[in-house]
Amino acid sequence: MKISARNQLKGTIAGIAEGAVNGVVAIDLGSTQVKADITMEAIEELGLKEGMDAVAIVKASSVMFAAGAERIQGISARNQIAGTIVSVKEGAVNGHVTIETAEGARIKGSITNEAIEELGLAEGGKALAIVKSTDVMVGVE
C-alpha cells in the first residue's frame, strides 16, 4: 500500500504503555524514539509487541520546527527529533523543510515561509522536528 504521508520512519517498538482507552507506543529510530498515542483497539488489532518492526507515519502538515538541536523544555509535544536541514523549498505562502537524522531518516514538514525566515532555517543548519504523539500513526507489515 502506498500512502500520501511524507514521513514514514522505520524502527523497532521499544515499549508500549497501555491505558484504559489509549496506549503510547514508543518506536526506536536509533538516536531517538518517536511516541505514538493510539487506541488500545489499534494496538491489539495490529498485534503490536515490544521488539517488532514498525513504522511511525506523520503527515508533513503535522510537523513543527525549532531552530537548533537542543530539546525544548516546557512544551507538551513528546517528539523532538534532532537533525540537519537538507532542504528548504519556499512556495508562494508555505514551504517544505526537510531534516535528516544521524541515521539518515528524513523528516519533511510544511510550514509558512514567514516561519522559515523568522527561524532562520537554511540548508546545513540544525533543527528539531516537533510532532505531537497524537499526530503519529503506526504501521506494520
Image: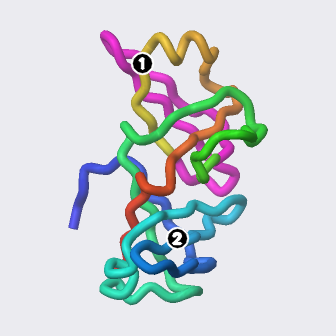
Magenta residues span 81-106
Q: Foreground residue, 1 or 120?
A: 120
Residue 15, image x, y percentages: 61, 79
Dot 1 corresponds to which residue? 112
Image coordinates for residue 102, horizontal then vertical, percent: 69, 51
Residue 35 place in picture, x, y as percent: 55, 63
Quadrant of image for the N terminus: bottom left
Residue in the picture at 51% in, 46% down: 131
Classify residue 20 as left or right of residue 105: left
What element does badge 2 sit on?
strand
Residue type beneath disc 1: Thr
| Mark 2, residue position | 24
x and y percentages locating residue 125 in the rendered image = 69, 26
What secondary structure is marked by label 1? Answer: strand
From mark 1 to mark 2, how far is it between C-alphas? Answer: 30 Å
Name the residue located 37 percent from the left edge and 73 percent from the top edge: 39
| Residue 86 drawn in magenta | yes
Left or right? Give the position of 124 relative to 130: right
In which quadrant of the rendered image does the C terminus lie? bottom left
Magenta portion: prevailing SS class: strand
Q: How many marks?
A: 2
Q: Amino acid at mark 2?
A: Val
Q: Which of the two labelled residues, at mark 1 and mark 2, occupies the earlier sequence position?
A: 2
Q: Is residue 96 above or below residue 108?
A: above
The residue sitting at 70% across, 32% down in the picture is 126
